[in-house]
Amino acid sequence: MATTITKRDLVIKLSNDTGLTQQEVFSVVQGALDSITEELAKGNSVVMRNFGAFQVKEVKGKIGRNPKDPSKDVPIPPRAVVKFKPGKEMKEKVAPILPVIQQA
């Protein structure tokens, strides 16, 4: 069964790996996440070679259905969403996990 890794877990691991304090690692990780978010909010793409690319895409508006009253149409407006496209190296490292997740 796969586990969920939180930002805190990541900070602890990086702190142990680098010898930096958890507060120093947290500042760097949070700064990176804030910078990525700021650039995406400006409509820019964020590309990290061998990791992947974050892009803002438009999801077109559509007509949905109210689950409580399926006869009523509910307009869903267009919106901006963040898409992630993994890089080659990440794809290669993640590919072998398929049989494990299929068994779950």
Image (cartoon, grey):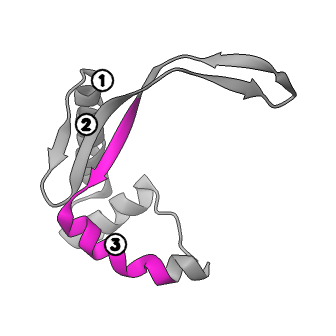
Residue 47 or residue 88, whichever sits in front: 88
Residue tagged by mark 2?
36
Mark 1 is on which residue type?
A: Ala
- The answer to whether residue 90 is left or right of residue 81 is left
85 relative position to 73: left or right: left
Residue labelled with disc 1: 41
Q: Is residue 85 magenta?
A: yes
Q: Which residue is mark 3?
A: 94
Q: Which residues are magenta?
A: 81-99
Crowding near the residue tagged with mark 2, few <14, some 14–19, many ≥20 C-alpha atoms within 10 Å: some
Foreground: disc 2 or disc 3: 3
Q: Earlier in the sequence, mark 1 or mark 3?
A: 1
SS majority, magenta: helix
* Residue at image point 46% right, 57% down: 6
Q: Residues within 10 Å of mark 1 (few under 14, many from 20)?
A: few
Please state, as top left, top right, bottom left or bottom right, where the C terminus lies in the image.
bottom right
Pointers 1 and 2 in contact (C-beta within 8 Å): no
Quadrant containing the N terminus in the rendered view: bottom right
Which residue appears at 23% of the width and 42% of the height?
Answer: 32
Q: Residue at x 67, y 26 (%)?
A: 64
* Marks 1/2: CA–CA distance: 9 Å
Answer yes or no: is residue 19 visible: no
Q: Give above or below for 38 relative to 31.
A: above
Q: Position of residue 47 (x, y in %)?
A: 16, 45
- Residue 44 part of the magenta segment: no
Q: Nearer the viewer, residue 89 or 34?
A: 89
Q: Nearer the viewer, residue 18 or 58?
A: 58
Task: Give the alpha-carbon distance from disc 1 to disc 3, as whole Å.
Answer: 28 Å
Residue type pointed to by label 3: Val
